[in-house]
Image (cartoon, rainbow, N blue to C red):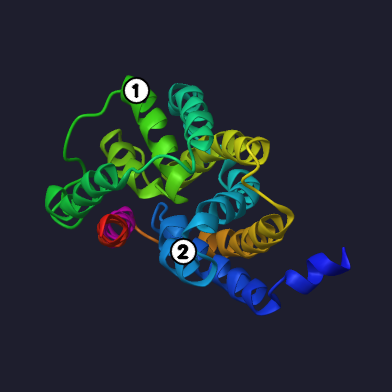
């Protein structure tokens, strides 16, 4: 136990806590993207191989608070279409965690996220393409695979939620419920396949505690926002997330 604490970087713990507070405050008022915003920071300070497990664990720990806060706003019919395929995708991705390269898929997703700026005319349009409930089945599978590898793919779902008529508190609450059960599959699979060690558990829990505070702050800010401002923030975060994801994917190919 003493040896473990000697290996823990306490400055990193402080950084992770405050990074969780800031990124998940922004994430709550913009419909997601907190995990994706943390990827460049964690890649730099802990390395790419540790980033996804830490971020997914931290996000998972923060989700119960978000579910409780937005319980009355969850759209359960979307939940039942999304979660089963997402959990299956997470298990498959964790099994192949260290062996599969998905840079080209990340590039395609990044370009799609960046294109939402034009699809929605920066929030002036409420919807850009039709979405049916069954679309969340393949979406759950695809997003969970990429998110399990990278540590964050929440923003890719936002256009589909918006085009299904789900916005503000409903969007945040529904995503939290979906992501919580996806997180069960991710964390269980990381642990089973030996990806999460004690050090990463400590860092992930720290991030999760900070993210929980961020959820509470974001909830208060979200209640004061209009639907138009929320939609604009969602689009802004999607574009920023797309740029970050594109840079990450291109660097991994070089």
- On the question of residue 224 being in view, the answer is no
Q: In this view of the protein, which residue sits in the foreground, 17 or 21?
A: 17
Asked whether residue 162 appears in the rendered view, the answer is yes
Residue 17 location in percent, x, y? 62, 70
Judging from the image, what secondary structure is the residue with disc 1 in?
A: helix
Spatial CA span between label 1 and label 2: 30 Å
Residue 117 is left or right of residue 70, and the answer is: left
> Which residue position holds label 2?
38
Classified by dominant secondary structure, the portion drawn in magenta counts as: helix
| Direction bottom: furthest residue | 11
- Where is residue 177? Give x, y as percent: 55, 37
What residue lies at 59% left-to-right and 69% top-to-bottom? 16
Asked which quadrant contains residue 101, the reply is top left
Characterize the local packing of mark 2: few (<14), some (14-19) or many (20 or more) Cα atoms within 10 angstroms. many
Check the image and report above or below for 7 versus 189.
Answer: below
Residue holding disc 1: 133
- The residue at 45%/24% (across/down) is 85
- The residue nearer to you, when weighing 238 against 199, is 199
Residue at 32% in and 53% down: 227
Q: Are marks 1 and 2 in contact (CB under 8 Å)?
A: no
Q: Which residues are magenta?
A: 227-240
Q: Farthest residue to the right: give it.
A: 2
Residue 233 located within the stretch drawn in magenta:
yes
In the rendered structure, the answer to whether residue 59 lies left or right of residue 221 reads: right
Q: Which part of the image, by quadrant, shows the C terminus?
A: bottom left
Q: Locate the N terminus and report the quarter of the image it occupies.
A: bottom right
């Amino acid at each position: 136990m003493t040896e473990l604490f000697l290996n823990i970087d306490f400055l990193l713990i402080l950084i992770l806590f405050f990074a969780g507070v800031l990124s998940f405050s922004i994430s709550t008022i913009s419909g997601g993207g907190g995990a994706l915003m943390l990827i460049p920071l964690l890649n730099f300070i802990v390395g790419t191989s540790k980033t996804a497990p830490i971020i997914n664990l931290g996000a998972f720990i923060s989700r119960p608070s978000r579910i409780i806060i937005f319980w009355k706003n969850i759209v359960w019919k979307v939940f039942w279409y999304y979660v089963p395929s997402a959990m299956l995708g997470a298990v498959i991705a964790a099994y192949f965690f260290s062996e599969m390269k998905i840079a080209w898929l990340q590039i395609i997703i990044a370009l799609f996220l960046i294109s939402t700026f034009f699809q929605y005319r920066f929030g002036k349009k409420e919807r850009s393409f039709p979405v049916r409930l069954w679309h969340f089945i393949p979406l759950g599978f695809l997003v969970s695979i990429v998110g399990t590898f990278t540590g964050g793919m929440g923003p890719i779902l936002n256009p589909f939620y918006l085009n299904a008529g789900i916005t503000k508190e409903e969007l945040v609450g529904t995503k939290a419920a979906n992501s919580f059960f996806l997180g069960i599959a991710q964390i269980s699979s990381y642990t089973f396949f030996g990806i999460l060690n004690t050090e990463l558990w400590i860092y992930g829990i720290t991030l999760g505690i900070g993210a929980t505070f961020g959820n509470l702050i974001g909830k208060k800010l979200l209640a004061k926002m209009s639907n138009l401002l929320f939609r604009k923030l969602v689009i802004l975060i999607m574009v920023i997330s797309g740029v970050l994801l594109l840079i990450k994917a291109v660097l991994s190919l070089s």
